[in-house]
Amino acid sequence: MVEKITQGIKISVNTKYNGTSYKNNRLYYVFAYFITIENHSLQTVKLKDRFWQIFDSLNKTEVVEGEGVVGQTPVLKPNDTYSYSSGCFLESNIGAMKGFYSMKNLNTSEHFKVIIPTFQLSTQILSN
């Protein structure tokens, strides 16, 4: 698990390898990721947008951005938690993801970024 706190918002990420799949006659490695967002601040915040960079060991980078996460734009009051899962397809068996959420402080109307720490996607456990 990787974790990062930005302005009182904690992001925790777990990953899982889900096997392979063929899409358009190409082999892909399928990964799931599980995100937990915890509001440790004293402010109520709303997740507005997401921005992802998805890397694989073939030196390919994909950028994904859009409104909310899995069709939701959750509001988190102080001490609230929101969890979701999603996934991605890679052309190689090793990769990584990182990014940020655009959040809005509903008390002050301030917009700010919450960092999603880099996390590894691998078909096997890698050692240092």
Image (spheres, rainbow, N blue to C red):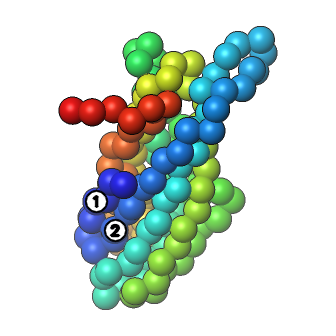
Give percent across and percent down for residue 93.
50, 23
Q: Are marks 2 and 1 in contact (CB under 8 Å)?
A: yes
Nearer the observer, 10 or 68: 10
Name the N-terminal-most of marks 2 and 1.
1
Give percent across and percent down for residue 95.
43, 28
Q: Quadrant of the N terminus?
A: bottom left
Q: Quadrant of residue 30?
A: top right
According to the image, label 2 marks what residue?
10
Of all residues, the one furthest to the left in this rendering is 128
**Is residue 30 placed above or below 87 in the rendered structure?**
above
Q: Quadrant of the C terminus?
A: top left
**Is residue 88 placed above or below 83 in the rendered structure?**
above
Residue neighbourhood size for the residue with mark 2, other residues' Cα within 10 Å, grouped as few (<14), some (14–19), many (≥20)? some
- Left or right: 10 in relation to 30: left
Residue neighbourhood size for the residue with mark 1, other residues' Cα within 10 Å, grouped as few (<14), some (14–19), many (≥20)? some
Residue 109 visible in the shown view: no
- Left or right: 72 in relation to 77: right
Q: Residue at x 46, y 83 (%)?
A: 80
According to the image, label 1 marks what residue?
4
**Is residue 108 placed above or below 101 in the rendered structure?**
below
Q: Residue at x 35, y 85 (%)?
A: 43
Q: Residue at x 40, y 74 (%)?
A: 38
Q: Residue at x 39, y 87 (%)?
A: 78
Look at the numbered disc 2 and give the secondary structure of its residue. Answer: strand
Nearer the observer, 33 or 48: 33
